[in-house]
Amino acid sequence: MDTVCFQGEQDLLADRQRQEWGPLREWFESEYNVKLGVATGLASPNHPEETILRVTEQLLSRDIWELCALEIATQTAKSFIVASALVDRETCLAEEAIRLAQLEEDFQVERWGMVEGDHDVTESEMLKWLTACRYFSKLHRDQTST
C-alpha cells in the first residue's frame, strides 16, 4: 500500500507521478529484484507474492538499528520505497525524499495554495526526521563496515 504505487487519475498529477515516481519505482525494483504493482483510483496495487517474499527477506537481513531508521523514515515519508531510497541510495538526500513523499501535496499546493502553519511546518518536521534517519543509517553503516 505504498504511496508511490498509486497513480492519480487526473492527467497532470498522473504525468508528474510517472515522471517522478517512475524512476524511483524502477530503482526499487532493481535494488530488491522485484516487480511492483501500480494501482489507479481506489484499487490496491497488486504486488506479486515473490515481491513480498523478497522484501521480507531483505528486511530480515537488516539489524535492529537499520530497521529503526527505516521505520521512522517510512512513517515520516508515508512510503517504504522513499524510505529505502533515503537510507540505501547514496544520491538520495532528505530534501529529495521530501520532494518524492510530498509530490501529491505539492501538486495540490500549486493549484490551491499553501496553508500557512500546516504545509510549511509539516515540511520542516519531515526535513528534521529524514535528515536524522539518513545520517544515522550512514553512520551506522560506516561503523559496522569497519
Image (cartoon, rainbow, N blue to C red):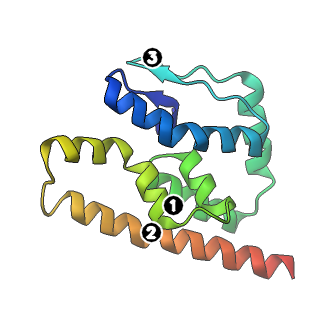
According to the image, label 3 marks what residue?
43
What residue appears at the point 49 percent right and 38 percent down from the top-left corner?
Answer: 19
Please give the label number shown on residue 72.
Answer: 1
* Label 2 vs label 1, nearer the camera: 2
Q: Is residue 95 above or below residue 20?
A: below
Q: At label 2, which amino acid type do we have?
A: Trp
Residue 140: x %, y % from top left: 71, 76
Q: Is residue 24 above or below residue 40?
A: below
Apparent side of residue 103 relative to residue 33 in the rendered image (left or right): left
According to the image, label 2 marks what residue?
129
Q: At label 1, which amino acid type do we have?
A: Ile
Q: Are marks 2 and 3 in contact (CB under 8 Å)?
A: no
What residue appears at the point 75 percent right and 46 percent down from the top-left corner?
Answer: 31
Residue 72: x %, y % from top left: 51, 60
Closer-to-camera residue (25/136): 25
Sequence order check, earlier mark of 2 and 3: 3
What residue appears at the point 42 percent right and 55 percent down from the top-left corner?
Answer: 99
Q: Are marks 2 and 1 in contact (CB under 8 Å)?
A: yes
Q: Which structural element holds mark 3?
A: loop
